Image (cartoon, rainbow, N blue to C red):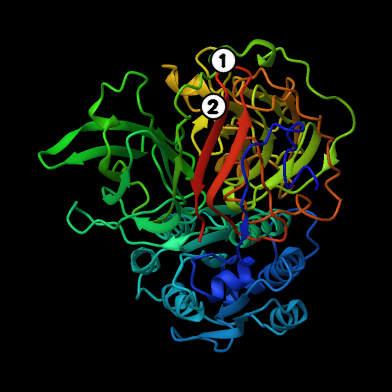
């Protein structure tokens, strides 16, 4: 078997049985209503009013009209969209010399027809008024509803060179109303050579519609910003899970078995779930909120997860709570908060007792932050205890060889394409890799890390061509590393940093984890506590939304230097035989790992890391993995995890 499918243990080290059940590919899962999300849909709303016949402002344009520039820009956009991505075109001001009802669907939202979209734009003759509000309302009706009921991104991309000339309905009010109607709808706006009231109106439309405003002062900028908005629509976080509905109070809270689930959460809302645990197992609960990329957020807007034990006398205190914030106000990105119920070594806590537990997720934000409901991806895993009499190895609380000065791989980077989230994270190994991302976008990768090993990596942004008026504009580059249980770790007080200023000039981030050790779960530092499971560790790389005002190219390049340090041990005691070393895999190689998807279950099964190619889901039902301990006899780790 390839290293993407398992991590081989030394002969005789496995004393148990590993049971694998492979779920359907994403397309089949969607048909069965499991909640797997496709890539959404896009409808472009193009200004074809009389002003689009005016020449493009600026020297060297040769009298080229704004409509001619728009035709070229949209041709570039449709050429860059993924094959089959549902895309449509609505136009206004194209059919009458005047009239506030002049809006029509020029191409229905359907699997991408590049030639048809280009022909539709080529046939337009600018002549009429600018009914933006009505066109936005109609565009929302043009977008198909998700057949599975799962939250998907549906994008209205407005392109205009002026403000609404009809008065009613008001564009900003329409955008706000659309944003309140459902999960996943966003309105992006591109202002082509606009200023004053026209720009203010388009900025308001984008902000109210959970989207972004992109300024295009010239034809080149129009093509660049349209590409960014359209590609961001098509490349959104691929959610996966069984639909579940949390309750606003404890009464009626749904019971969760180990597995992956989908829900939604609104601003100021708290969602309740329940589960039953025994006295000895470690339980992991993670919640990932997925707002629209770049939607309005404040630095301290947060997502909080909590695990509370319940008994016949009521609550017995919070077993674990964790809050995560955005740390920036440029725009929303996926946000993950995770908690664990780890039985104490002396069994003194009320949370060590068996019984019913509440799992809660709470979203809090400041006034002016995104008011839309966010998709919520939940993961519950249960890790069975050590057998009586076994003695785990010491914890590994120091970064040691994996500190900031660790030697990382050199050489020519190999091109890869990161995933959209945990479920389709791109599998990588030790090596040097090159990728690109859009402003407000996050790329995801997974790296297999075994017992006694630690992950260490750098993210390097290089010199980028910048736009002429980018002076003084600042954005950021960010990264985070997550354990197989999706607990964010790695920042380490005074050791690593997860964020750097981005200006288009070279900038770097250094990140890593301590070595994986079973006993790390008892350490007080959360950057150590979470690192107690081997398997797929996830790397997320983000570029701030304001980078759209800095970089000239639609996407911004970066390099990942990844090292998995230390010899992998055959068991959690770290004294058994060393596992055979793994070989870095060429990203162009076919088979699992070359283009993985549905990796929600990857790497969370004791000493075995699992990846499934082709977007398949992974179902681990009562996985049993035994490893021989050098001291204390045989150890069996029973990790239960179910992904629907």
Residue 416 appears at what percent x and percent y? 78, 46
Q: In this view, does 52 lie above or below 469?
A: below
Residue 130 appears at what percent x and percent y? 49, 75
The residue that disc 2 covers is: 531
The residue that disc 1 covers is: 396
Residue 560 bears which disc, if any? none
Task: Using a 10 Å C-alpha cutoff, classify the residue at mark 1 as few (fewer than 14 neighbours), some (14 to 19) or many (20 or more).
Answer: many
Q: Is residue 116 above or below residue 643?
A: below
Residue 158 falls left or right of residue 388:
right
Q: Which residue is drawn at 40% across and 65% down?
A: 175
Callout 2: SS: loop
Task: Using a 10 Å C-alpha cutoff, classify the residue at mark 2 as few (fewer than 14 neighbours), some (14 to 19) or many (20 or more).
Answer: many
Query: Between 129 and 239, which is closer to the camera in this rendering?
Result: 239
Question: Toward which corner of the image does residue 474 lie, by quadrant?
Answer: top right
Residue 298 falls left or right of residue 405:
left
Query: Between 239 and 443, which is closer to the camera in this rendering?
Result: 239
Question: Toward which corner of the image does residue 435 lie, by quadrant?
Answer: top right
Whether residue 192 can be seen here: no
Q: Residue at x 19, y 51 (%)?
A: 250
**Marked residue nearer the N-terminal end (1 or 2):** 1
Q: Are marks 1 and 2 in contact (CB under 8 Å)?
A: yes
Query: Between 104 and 298, which is closer to the camera in this rendering?
Result: 298
Residue 393 appears at what percent x and percent y? 56, 16
Question: Toward which corner of the image does residue 545 lie, by quadrant?
Answer: top right
Residue 102 appears at what percent x and percent y? 50, 86
């Amino acid at each position: 078997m390839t290293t993407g499918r398992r991590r081989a243990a030394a002969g005789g080290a496995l004393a148990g049985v590993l049971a694998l059940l492979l779920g359907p590919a994403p397309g089949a899962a969607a048909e069965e209503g499991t909640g797997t999300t496709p890539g959404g849909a896009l409808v472009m709303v193009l200004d074809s009013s009389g002003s689009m016949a005016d020449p493009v402002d600026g020297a060297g344009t040769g009298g080229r009209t704004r409509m001619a520039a728009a035709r070229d820009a949209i041709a570039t956009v449709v050429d860059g969209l993924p094959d089959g991505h549902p895309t449509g075109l609505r136009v206004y001001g194209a059919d009458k010399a005047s009239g506030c009802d002049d809006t029509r669907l020029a191409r229905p939202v359907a699997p991408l027809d590049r030639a048809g979209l280009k022909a539709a734009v080529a046939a337009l003759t600018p002549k009429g008024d600018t009914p933006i509000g009505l066109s936005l309302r109609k565009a929302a009706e043009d977008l198909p509803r998700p057949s599975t009921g799962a939250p998907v991104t549906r994008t209205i991309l407005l392109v205009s060179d002026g403000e609404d000339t009809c008065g009613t309905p008001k564009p900003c009010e329409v955008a706000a109303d659309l944003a309140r109607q459902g999960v996943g709808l966003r309105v992006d706006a591109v202002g082509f050579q606009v200023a004053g009231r026209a720009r203010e109106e388009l900025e308001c439309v984008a902000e109210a519609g959970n989207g972004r405003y992109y300024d295009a002062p010239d034809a080149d900028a129009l093509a660049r910003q349209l590409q960014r908005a359209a590609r961001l629509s098509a490349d959104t976080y691929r959610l996966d899970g069984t639909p579940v509905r949390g309750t606003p109070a404890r009464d009626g809270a749904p019971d969760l078995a180990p597995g992956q689930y989908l829900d939604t959460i609104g601003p100021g809302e708290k969602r309740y779930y329940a589960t039953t645990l025994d006295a000895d197992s470690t339980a992991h609960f993670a919640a990932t909120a997925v707002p629209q990329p770049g939607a309005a957020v404040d630095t301290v807007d947060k997502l909080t997860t909590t695990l509370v034990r319940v008994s016949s006398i009521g609550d017995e205190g919070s077993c674990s709570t964790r809050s995560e914030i955005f740390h920036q106000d440029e725009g929303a990105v996926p946000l993950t908060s995770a908690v664990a119920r780890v039985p104490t070594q002396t069994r003194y806590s009320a949370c060590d007792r068996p019984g019913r537990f509440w799992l809660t997720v709470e979203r809090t934000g400041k006034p002016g932050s995104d008011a839309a409901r966010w998709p919520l991806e939940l993961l519950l895993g249960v890790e069975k205890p050590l057998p009586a009499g076994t003695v785990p190895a010491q914890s590994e609380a120091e970064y040691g060889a994996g500190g900031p000065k660790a030697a990382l791989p050199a050489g020519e980077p190999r091109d890869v394409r990161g995933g959209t989230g945990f479920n389709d994270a791109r599998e990588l190994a030790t090596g040097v890799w090159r990728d690109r991302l859009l402003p407000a976008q996050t790329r995801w990768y997974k790296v297999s890390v075994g017992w006694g090993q630690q992950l260490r990596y750098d993210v390097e942004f290089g010199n980028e061509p910048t736009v002429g008026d980018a002076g003084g504009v600042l954005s950021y580059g960010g990264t985070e590393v997550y354990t197989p249980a999706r607990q964010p770790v790695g920042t380490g007080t005074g050791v690593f940093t997860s964020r750097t200023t981005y200006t288009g000039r070279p900038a770097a981030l250094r990140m890593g984890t301590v070595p994986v050790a079973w006993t790390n779960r008892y350490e007080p530092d959360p950057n150590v506590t979470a690192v107690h499971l081997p398997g797929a560790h996830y790397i997320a790389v983000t570029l701030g939304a304001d980078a759209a005002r800095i970089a000239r190219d639609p996407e911004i390049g970066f390099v990942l230097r990844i090292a998995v340090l230390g010899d992998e041990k055959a068991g959690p005691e770290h004294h058994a035989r060393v596992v055979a070393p793994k070989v870095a895999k060429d990203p162009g190689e076919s088979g699992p790992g070359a283009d993985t998807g549905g990796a929600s279950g990857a790497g969370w099964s004791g000493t075995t890391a699992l990846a499934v190619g082709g977007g398949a889901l992974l179902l681990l039902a009562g996985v049993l993995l035994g490893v021989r301990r050098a001291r204390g006899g045989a150890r069996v780790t029973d990790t239960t995890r179910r992904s629907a």
